[in-house]
Amino acid sequence: QVQLVESGGGSVQAGGSLRLSCVVSGALYSRYTVGWFRQSQGKEREGVAALGKDGSTVYADSVKDRFTISQDNAKRTLDLQMNSLKPEDTAMYYCAAGPFVSDRLNRRQYLYWGQGTQVAVSL
């Protein structure tokens, strides 16, 4: 069983930055693909960024060059640095982990989910 707990959400003005963090426990961290997803009101949950077992990263087009995903294996945390935030980035952000993920931005391939942390970006 894998447990994930997110933190770091909040309210920020457009152009600002936030850093989300996810603590991963209960599993051998290196055996999982991990990622960040978001869901805004009335929309499906979408992939934002993911980190493969080999350390490679993938980003949604909408966040490329603004968001950076990283992990600290010693602390067992998965972070998402979000810069140049826009109102359309407003959503509940979730971290997720999966042992067998081939399409890293596909939410259906992830097995474990955190409870989410809210991000609100205003003009």
Image: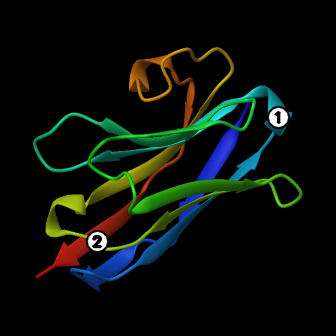
Residue 67, placed above or below residue 11: above
Picture residue at 38% right of the left edge, 63% below the top: 66
- The front one of 85 and 96 is 85
SS under mark 1: helix
* Residue under numbered circle 2: 85
Q: In the image, residue 59 lies at what x, y percent?
A: 43, 42
Q: In the image, residue 86 lies at what x, y percent?
A: 20, 69
Residue 86, placed above or below residue 114: below
* Residue under numbered circle 1: 30
Q: In the image, residue 79 lies at what x, y percent?
A: 60, 60
- Residue 39 visible in rendering: yes
- The front one of 17 and 3 is 17
Q: Amino acid at mark 2?
A: Leu
Picture residue at 15% right of the left edge, 39% below the top: 43
Quarter location, residue 98 = top right
Q: Quadrant of the N terminus?
A: top right
Q: Which mark is residue 15?
A: none
Picture residue at 29% right of the left edge, 83% below the top: 12
Q: Which of the two discs, 1 and 2, sits closer to the camera?
A: 2
- The first of marks 1 and 2 along the sequence is 1
